[in-house]
Amino acid sequence: MNKLMKTVPAALMLMVSLFTSAGGASAAAAVLTPSIQAAFELTAAAAESTARVRLKSQYSELSAQTAQYESREEQIRILHESNAQALLVVRNQIKEIDQAAVAKLTSAVSSVKQHYQPLFDQYSALNTRITLLKGLKDKTLNSVLRTQAEAMKIAVQIARQEIRDKEALLKAAKEERSRKITAARKTLAGIDSPQTTIKSQKNVAAALNQRITADFSDFKSAVRKQNPVLAGQSLTSLLSGYKQIAASKQKIIELEQKVAAVIAATARQIAP
């Protein structure tokens, strides 16, 4: 147990690291700095009134979308790390299912065998002596030895039966432990499907991030040139990309929640 306690922190940090790298937060592709804000204000001011209102509305929506992006990224990060820790714990718990009970029965079998070994040795030696003395005509000695052997035989049979009983208990305990572990791992395997889908959604989000980065570059170029038309087109594309990535991130959140639910169900299943 002490050894396990020493190894768990290191394993936990590794697991958290893996999970975090798999679903950790990344910076929003569009960062609306004060200088970009100022350039946009000048660009909007150069547009006619209807276009100006639309541009400002789009810019305000973009600001909200980038904030939502960061919020979802943080939510995903927290879920990933929480699942990493819970998964490590539940996997260790699965390994420890009935481990103490099996160890206790194993020790009991070993102990009872050691306890009766002198009896078995004496019984074996006595039978060997009877065999060696068969050639002699000492009926009295043979009779005494056989009487001793018969008396000891009963004790040996009782001892062997006790050993068999304890071995049967150990075998049953091992089989039950194996059954519980198999069942728990089957339940825990329910995380495989959502984790696979998470990877797929992450690929979708990564592709959308690249698109947003390109659109944002076009937007910055447009506001530097104070071109309302190009700025509006870039904002339209940016908003479309952010809405799609928001949907993808929301799916990842829901999938991480499914993973958490499976881990929790496994923990309840193996709870003593």
Image (tube, rainbow, N blue to C red):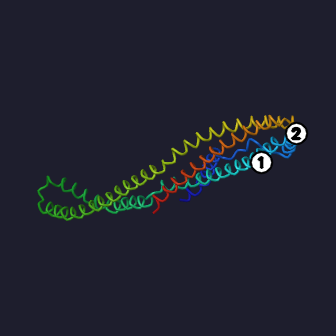
Q: Which residue is mark 1?
A: 60
For residue 125, side relative to residue 190 (left or right): left
Count of numbered tags: 2
Q: Residue at x 58, y 39 (%)?
A: 200
Please provide percent x and percent y for residue 80: 61, 50
Label 2 – label 1 distance at C-alpha? 18 Å
- Sequence order check: which comes first, mark 2 or mark 1? 2
Towards the viewer: 159 or 122: 159
Q: Is residue 56 above or below residue 122?
A: above
Please provide percent x and percent y for residue 207: 66, 36
For residue 62, side relative to residue 267 (left or right): right
Q: Residue at x 67, y 43 (%)?
A: 243
Please provide percent x and percent y for residue 135: 14, 52
What is the three-letter code of the residue carrying label 1? Ser
Callout 2 crowding tier (Cα within 10 Å): few <14, some 14–19, many ≥20: some
Q: Which residue is mark 2?
A: 46
Camera-nearest label, 2 or 1: 2
Towards the viewer: 249 or 44: 44
Callout 1 crowding tier (Cα within 10 Å): few <14, some 14–19, many ≥20: few
Q: Name the secondary structure under disc 2.
A: loop
Q: Which mark is residue 131?
A: none
